Image (cartoon, rainbow, N blue to C red):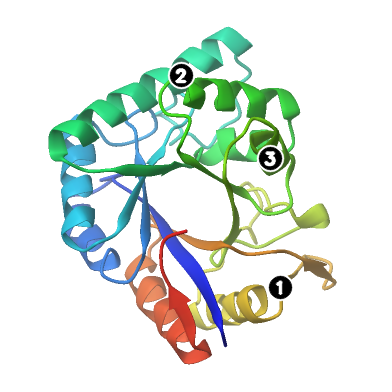
Amino acid sequence: MNKSIDFNCDLGEYCSPDQEEKEKTILRYISSANIACGMHAGNDESIYKTMLHAKSLGVSVGAHPSFPDRQNFGRTEMFLPPEELESVVYEQLQNFLNIASSAGVEVRHVKPHGALYNMAAKSDEISKVICIAIKKTNKDLKFFGLAGSVMLQVAKEQGFETVSEVFADRRYGAGGFLVARSKKNALITEVDEARTQLHRLVAEDRVLLEDKSFWGLSAQTVCIHGDGVNAVEFAEGLRGEMDKLGVAVCPP
């Protein structure tokens, strides 16, 4: 297949003592890393370390800002006033860029995390606030967002180069949105099912929905989550599937 795609993972979340070693392994298979900015997980030390690990392997680095919600890992909806949300995102990005400068690492993209990501996917207002915060730090950063969603449309209108993201380890529901994590079937936990989903997304530009119908999606980057129990197995297996398809894996 004459096609290239980015393979990204949410990292720098260091939820357990062995997480750093686990992430080092994942980094061998991916082309872009979305690094937690400290408000849902991680801290300045984990940001710095993950940046250096990524740099050593030629993996592109991006910021992964979230709601200020460590208790719920940034996966619970928060309804912040626009000014407060802008400040929250700006603070994370500015600190992230300062750490990157000290590490000698170029930051290439921004991808909102968790509930912030999912709310922005459906909200012009939230998406615009995120874009304003990014512009105040580095307007040249690429914007990673849910394929086919409002957030990508708004980011384009705000002048950003956008990257359409799909998920190999999450199930999809009506309208091409991710199934809420509160539902039992939200996560794909078996690598074979993830391979099947990846194949459909990359080779067929579509995904199977909850109701067993198909939804068309354009994939420029494929995501897996670094905090998943089988994240290393997924990274290895899905990279192998991409190689099998003849897809070139590289940053956007």
Q: Which residue is mark 2?
A: 136
**Disc 1 to disc 3, how far (Cα)?**
19 Å
* Near-viewer residue (119 or 16): 119
Label 1 CA crowd tier, 10 Å (few <14, some 14–19, many 20+): some
* Residue 251 in sight in this render: yes
Q: Secondary structure at mark 1?
A: loop
Q: Residue type at mark 3?
A: Ala
**Disc 3 to disc 2, how far (Cα)?**
21 Å
Q: Which residue is mark 1?
A: 205
In the image, is residue 43 above or below residue 214? above
Q: Secondary structure at mark 3?
A: loop
Q: Secondary structure at mark 2?
A: loop
Label 2 CA crowd tier, 10 Å (few <14, some 14–19, many 20+): few
Left or right of residue 156: residue 242: left
In the image, is residue 244 above or below residue 59? below
Q: Which residue is mark 3?
A: 121
Q: Residue type at mark 1?
A: Asp
Left or right of residue 10: residue 113: right
Left or right of residue 126: residue 250: left
Image depth: mark 2 or mark 1 in front: 2
